[in-house]
Image: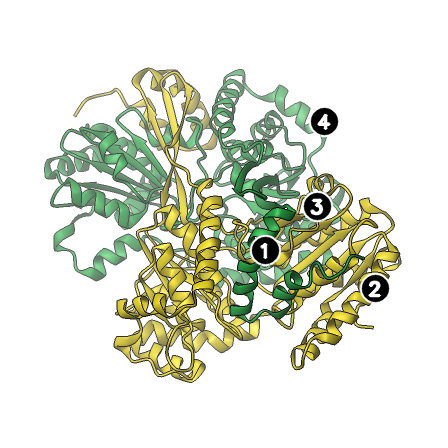
Chain colours: A green, B yellow
């Protein structure tokens, strides 16, 4: 049996906690591993990047070749299959349409009282780094998921880092996606060394104020080391999905959707939560059947991931299924129930809620429009998906007129006196004493 | 001379960096100091809280007295002076009016394509901790600055911690502010022990998902220790203010406003940036005069802070003044120029921009409406003020219809194939193979 089945009411508290905790990325060791790399890049800049790129990516990238050239961008567009180019265009356009709604234009002005005018202004962060990871393959989808909101936010300096392939090149699909999004600064450097370069800058790579994008545990560790200097964005670790289903669900589709998350990595999790034992049985059968078709070595890999972090949780009723989902706070949640809208509206903690039998995880990972870079590990309880807001920051702009000042003056003096702030009160008490 | 005057064009790069760096809170030592406290609270809960409250706050608070009682809330309202109560009511109402505009109601729905409907839903975080610090006095203003947005966001569980006074009580003004905001869970515990209690929960204090609020360097250190478990919000360290002024500014008011930030703490900074040498001279004179009036021990304290982190930066022209402000990215910025709106619109990096001669820092600290809990230490480059958004998180809700699915299917299969995701593509390729 590949699928573990847990009866929720029979689980001890510790077992529930273990399941809810999923694969926790313990990066303490990785922090020590990458510390010398990060420090070396800070000290030696591009020379260190060349060295670590050779060592970790097996690629020879000279100092003057770190930045991808215009010629490479041009060649990339020409080299892609028409079909793939169309798919990228389609997906980028959808992502742009969704994220456009997040852009805040004019400041909202509030007249707090007559004579007290305040507004919230949203301005782009001056310089941002996007980390586009690679795995077994490259990820053009990560490029557009990060680049579209950064460009819409109006960030003046956007620097993208991505690990080169062994021959020193970057996947043309990644470059094509970048240029379609309006990005022209792409640097072929990955891992901890890329994060260090973005945090402190090198002769080639500009220092940025914030870095956004998922990566390996080395990337996560490097982010922790630079977190005192720059903003490192939302926590994104091993991918995870959950399907909440009732007896109306189609087991074949549930099985297909359940399997996809497992191929992200060896610590991904994929859980079916349902009160329907017959569904669990049918899904288990379909998963076994589908797994049997998968060629090696993928078969062993998927089977292994499934038996560790995959499985089904059998609940007492649909309400308990929702409780489990809210406790787990999944990155991706798919709702396969009779009334999926009602179920979805009860979900408080999930980065992404997909509704109904046609909204496969795969679609949302690539092309429905919303961002696919999402908080994992339970961070959906306090963070949302990457958005245009990640690339802007707010400022309050406040103007008090002379009459507004007169109205509030005594109240504020009283509050400052109560809190023991002498000069705060004095700045109002003595304000009219003289003119310069 | 209390005020240091720096000529910007004469400063070496290292000196500019030193000024822009201001008082950096180095909390590495504090992290080691508070680590045993944090671990002990995790292990022993309320019993540890009682012990540390006795040791650090000198207050005897029994385990069953950690939570402030209804009777204390009632007595607090009765014990306050009418004037102070009115001032609190006035300020709370203003803060509520401003923050109400930040509440997001219905999800914005985007039809990305026919058959692809996506929306962004904003839901409150389940449970939040507010840390209300105390200093020489208590800070009812911090209570309402944190509580108003948390309550407007709809957070179901709001737990407030604040250090007790030596007699074990909490300032009635703080309790009055809490109850006016709709808060009834106030715990008399502060410091690192409070952060640990909020992160992991005790028998008395609920575990929360996020903690918001400024505090001592011990509080900042404890936040770092729990940051892998809960969201610890924006970085708020030593307070800092900057005034950008031209020759039209009133030196008396500039001097009054410049002095207020210095009393927040020994590592606060307060800088005047201007291209007008005559203004610097007049402000210096006024500051000396005002300082001379301040009674001891405050006089020595303010003089000391000023000579370390206060002063004036003399620039070549008004444009350079704006450049310096954007580089510094101050927490509080006050604009005293001939056309303050034009100046303000050139400011990209400041948590708060106050416009014109009547908008004293003191007013914004207490009662103009916008939040006074702001990012410091240059974090205004990527973070904004505390807002309703800090207490909510976004989720994407996505529904694809059957026709929408048909339209995007092949594009997504192509993208998944390119990225090497076999089961992602299979979930679409095999979707219609059979029905369960």
Q: Residue drawn 61% across and 47% down? A: A403
Relative to A293, B325 lies left or right: right
The mark closer to the camera, 2 or 4, is 2
Label placed on residue A206: 3
Q: How far is disc 1 from disc 3 in space, using C-alphas? A: 39 Å
SS for dot 1? helix
- What number is the disc on residue B5? 2
In this rendering, would B178 be left or right of A16? right
Please state which of the two labelled residues, at mark 2 or mark 3, is closer to the viewer: 2
> Crowdedness of circle 4 by 10 Å Cα count: few (<14), some, many (20+)?
few
Q: Which residue is mark 4?
A: A71
Q: Are marks 1 and 4 in contact (CB under 8 Å)?
A: no
Alpha carbons under labels 3 and 4: distance apart: 21 Å
At mark 3, the secondary structure is loop
Whether label 2 touches label 3, CB < 8 Å: no
Front: mark 1 or 4:
1
Q: Residue at x 79, y 58 (%)?
A: B251
- Quadrant in which residue A359 is drawn: top left
């Amino acid at each position: 049996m590949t699928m573990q089945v847990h009866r929720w009411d029979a689980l001890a508290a510790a077992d529930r906690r273990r399941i809810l905790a999923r694969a926790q990325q313990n990066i303490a060791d990785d922090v020590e591993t990458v510390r010398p790399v990060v420090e070396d890049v800070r000290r030696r800049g591009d020379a260190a990047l060349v060295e670590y790129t050779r060592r970790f990516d097996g690629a020879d990238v000279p100092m003057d070749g770190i930045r991808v050239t215009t010629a490479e961008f041009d060649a990339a567009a020409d080299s892609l299959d028409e079909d793939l180019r169309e798919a990228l265009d389609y997906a980028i356009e959808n992502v742009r349409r969704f994220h456009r709604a997040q852009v805040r234009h004019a400041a909202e002005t509030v007249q707090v009282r007559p004579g007290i005018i305040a507004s919230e202004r949203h301005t782009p962060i001056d310089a941002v780094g996007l980390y586009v990871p690679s795995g077994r393959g490259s990820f053009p989808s990560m490029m557009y998921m990060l680049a579209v909101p950064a460009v819409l936010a109006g960030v003046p300096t956007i620097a993208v880092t991505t690990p080169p392939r062994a021959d020193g090149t970057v996947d043309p699909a990644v470059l094509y996606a970048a240029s379609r999004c309006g990005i022209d600064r792409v640097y072929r450097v990955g891992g901890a060394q890329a994060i260090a370069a973005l945090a402190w800058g090198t002769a080639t790579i500009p220092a940025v104020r914030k870095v956004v994008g998922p990566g390996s545990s080395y990337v996560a560790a490097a982010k922790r080391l630079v977190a005192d200097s720059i903003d490192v964005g939302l926590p994104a670790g091993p991918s995870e999905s959950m399907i909440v289903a009732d007896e109306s669900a189609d087991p074949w589709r549930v099985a297909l959707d359940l399997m996809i998350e497992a191929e992200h990595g060896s610590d991904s999790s994929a859980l079916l939560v349902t009160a329907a034992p017959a569904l669990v049985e049918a899904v288990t059968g379909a998963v076994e059947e589908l797994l049997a078709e998968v060629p090696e070595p993928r078969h062993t890999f998927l089977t292994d991931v499934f038996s560790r972090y995959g499985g089904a949780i059998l609940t007492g009723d649909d309400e308990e299924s929702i409780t489990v989902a809210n406790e787990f706070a999944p990155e991706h949640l798919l709702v396969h129930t009779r009334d999926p809208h009602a179920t979805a509206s009860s979900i408080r903690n999930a980065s992404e809620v997909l509704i109904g039998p046609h909204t496969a995880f795969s679609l949302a990972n690539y092309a429905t429009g919303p961002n696919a870079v999402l908080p994992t590990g339970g961070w959906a309880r306090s963070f949302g998906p990457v958005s245009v807001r990640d690339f802007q920051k707010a400022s309050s702009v406040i103007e008090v007129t002379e009459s507004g000042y007169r109205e509030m003056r005594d109240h504020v003096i009283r509050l400052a006196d109560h809190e023991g702030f002498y000069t705060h009160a004095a700045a109002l008490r003595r304000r009219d004493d003289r003119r310069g």
